Amino acid sequence: MPDLRTNLYDLTREELRLLLVRWGFSPVHAARLWSYLYLGLADSFDAMPELPAKARDRLAAAAGIGMLPTALATDSADGFTRKFLLALPDGERIETVLMRYTGRVTACVSSQVGCAMGCVFCATGQMGYTRHLTPGEIVAQAVHVARALRSPPPIQCQLLVDVVGKTHRGQHGPSGDPTPRLRNVVLMGMGEPLHNYDAVMHAVDILRDPNGLALGAERITLSTVGVVPGILRLAVEKRPLHLAVSLHAATQAERAALVPAAKKWPLDELMAACRTYSEATGRRIFYEWTLIEGQNDSADQARAVGHLLRGLPAQVNLIPLNPTAGYDGTPTRGEAAKRFQKILAEEFDLPSTVRQRRGIDIAAGCGQLAAG
Ligand code: SAH
Ligand code: SF4
């Protein structure tokens, strides 16, 4: 039987207040409930002693806390990455990743079960599309990661954090902070977030709430395959988030071979939308480029991306290809990646980074998420 009760994770603080007042509760109860959900990370109404017992009973009859049970949790060998396979109420499953850096943690969350965009090198694309996630299912992933931080990290990770903490003492604030908190959310898990625009933006509003998880403007990054109408809508709505656009190739023909969605939203339309977005918001866009040996990592291709992004506020994020079952490519090696970066920097004054390879041993890297 489907649970027809309201999922509280679906609601912004204001929506929760209005609903509770409609149900006859006071705004004070609503504020307490919100704190229990997002500061206390409570998993049941029984864990809310400051709400009167009668109120808790009435709430439990009409509403649920849509936590997602863990079907499987896996830690990378270095202890820095933990991947959760989470069960959705209808039996579908998604993956969410916790990534530890010194003193802070990033959650990589999914926006759909599978993905309809079919990028050839992506495990999520290879599994096809099943459905959109609800706002509450997106929020629940961030809460899940925040809750996981309450238990101590794997021992090998503690040792590494210790060493890194000592090495960087003074650079990273108070060293040895025992409980790093959830600092960033990246919408880079399974799915195409701009294909599920309304639910994703609703979830972003809930995650940003300063009285809750407080993942403010600079803390949420959304990565899109290049859904042009979504980028244009973001330009109008000026949502406070970082935008990353998956480029991977600088000509329409090369891009369409890797990213089928490019046939629907061609490169020239995509670049026009990116320009509109940057002009409207004053924000720089991160352009992602999965580096595949012999495919899109030559000096000429580096120059082509340099020309394409000329004059735009941009940073390029290079991601050496991660292995997936359905694609046969090889990641670009370190030297070739450095040459690519050097061309961007020296010939085009274009900043770039090579994304740290984390969690590859547990298939938690970019493009490796899938849930059978
Ligand atoms: N759907 C969004 C976000 C998902 S993945 C998007 O496509 O942008 C985040 C990044 O990982 C994207 O740039 C994506 O193209 C890239 N990616 C996908 N598969 C990959 C793989 N096998 N190796 C490296 N990067 C990959
Ligand atoms: Fe979907 Fe992004 Fe994977 Fe492409 S890279 S298939 S858009 S999740």
Image (cartoon, rainbow, N blue to C red):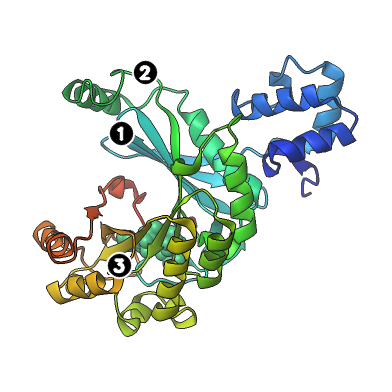
Residue 136 in the image: above or below residue 47: below
Q: Position of residue 359 (x, y in %)?
A: 31, 45
Mark nearer the N terminus (1 vs 3): 1
Which one is closest to the eye, mark 1 or mark 2? 2
**Amino acid on which the number 3 mark rests in the picture:** Gly
Mark nearer the N terminus (1 vs 2): 1
Q: Are marks 1 and 2 in contact (CB under 8 Å)?
A: no
Residue 172 in the image: above or below residue 123: above
35 lies left or right of 331: right
Nearer the observer, 290 or 89? 290
Residue 199 in the image: above or below residue 125: above
On the image, numbered disc 2 is attached to which residue? 178
Crowdedness of circle 2 by 10 Å Cα count: few (<14), some, many (20+)? Answer: few
Q: Quadrant of residue 342?
A: bottom left
Residue 176 appearing in the image: yes
Judged from the image, the secondary structure of the residue bearing numbered disc 1 is: loop
The quadrant of the rendered image in which ligand 1 is seen is: bottom left
Pick out the residue farthest to the bottom.
Answer: 253
Q: Position of residue 240 (x, y in %)?
A: 52, 48
On the image, numbered disc 1 is attached to which residue? 79
**Amino acid on which the number 2 mark rests in the picture:** Pro
Judged from the image, the secondary structure of the residue bearing numbered disc 2 is: loop
On the image, numbered disc 3 is attached to which residue? 311
Q: Is mark 2 within 8 Å of ligand 1?
A: no
Instruction: Give the spatial CA distance, label 1 vs label 2.
Output: 16 Å
